[in-house]
Image: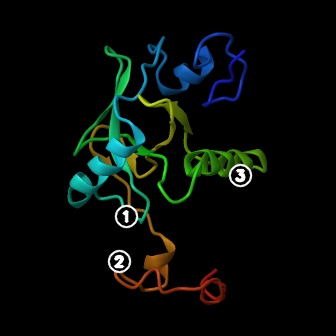
């Protein structure tokens, strides 16, 4: 008996529940494993990092759902989801991030569609719908704490929780 890594519901012998698949698209009846292993995803994230507008230290990729092929595909532009693979140094980081978002949702915090997807090597990658996109090509302005504190990409990690309190 499997549990869906998107909804946590029982899904019999399937990898995903019907409801989990339909959260991505009502037309999605199956989802094939992501075509890249965790190591390959990390390599791709290094190669594509200059082309992405998504910041942060975690390896990540921009993807879109190809409903006809029942698979997520890596794209340089127009991605509606972000995938984060297993980390070499921090085991089960995708599972941890998914659980953290699930707990936030449980206590009433609004969160984007998220979950875990199976990869070619049997590992999980974390997937989250981009909340800074609207319609076909609309970009929504989103501020993070680096912007609120006046820090830039080079200095934003030189910050502490103590400095964050006055900003809140």
| The C terminus: image quadrant | bottom right
Task: Residue at 59%, 12% (x, y): give it.
Answer: 14
In the displayed structure, 102 sits above or below 5; it is: below
Looking at the rendered structure, the secondary structure element under dot 2 is loop
List the residue tagged with mark 3. 104
Task: Residue at 26%, 43% (x, y): give it.
Answer: 137
Label 1 vs 2, first from the N-terminus: 1
Q: CA distance from mark 1 to mark 2?
A: 8 Å
In the displayed structure, 21 sits above or below 121; it is: above
Q: Are marks 1 and 2 in contact (CB under 8 Å)?
A: yes
Q: CA distance from mark 1 to mark 3?
A: 22 Å
Total tally of numbered discs in the picture: 3
Q: Residues within 10 Å of mark 3 (few under 14, many from 20)?
A: few
Left or right of residue 139: residue 148: right
Q: Residues within 10 Å of mark 2 (few under 14, many from 20)?
A: few
Looking at the rendered structure, the secondary structure element under dot 1 is loop
Q: Give whichever of 62, 24 is nearer the camera.
A: 62
Quadrant of the image occupied by residue 75: top left
Q: Residue 23's x, y, as percent? A: 55, 26
In the displayed structure, 55 sits above or below 149; it is: above
List the residue tagged with mark 1. 55
Task: Residue at 46%, 49% (x, y): give it.
Answer: 131
Q: Residue 12's x, y, as percent? A: 68, 11
Instruction: Farthest residue to the right: give it.
Output: 107
Label 1 vs 3, first from the N-terminus: 1
* Residue 153 marker: 2
* Residue 63 marker: none
């Amino acid at each position: 008996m499997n549990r869906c890594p998107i909804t946590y519901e029982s899904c019999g012998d399937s990898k995903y529940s019907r409801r989990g698949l339909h959260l991505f698209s009502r037309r999605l009846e199956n989802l094939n494993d992501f075509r890249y292993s965790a190591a390959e995803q990390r390599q791709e994230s290094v190669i594509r990092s200059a082309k992405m507008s998504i910041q942060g230290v975690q390896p990540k990729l921009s993807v879109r759902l190809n409903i006809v092929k029942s698979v997520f595909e890596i794209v340089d532009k127009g991605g509606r989801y972000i995938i984060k693979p297993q980390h070499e140094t921090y085991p089960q980081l995708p599972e941890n991030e998914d659980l953290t978002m699930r707990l936030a949702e449980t206590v009433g915090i609004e969160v984007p569609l998220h979950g875990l997807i199976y990869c070619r090597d049997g590992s999980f990658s974390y997937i989250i719908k981009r909340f800074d996109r609207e319609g076909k090509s609309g970009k929504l302005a989103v501020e993070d704490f680096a912007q609120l504190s006046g820090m830039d990409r080079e200095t934003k990690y030189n910050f502490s929780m103590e400095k964050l309190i006055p900003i809140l």
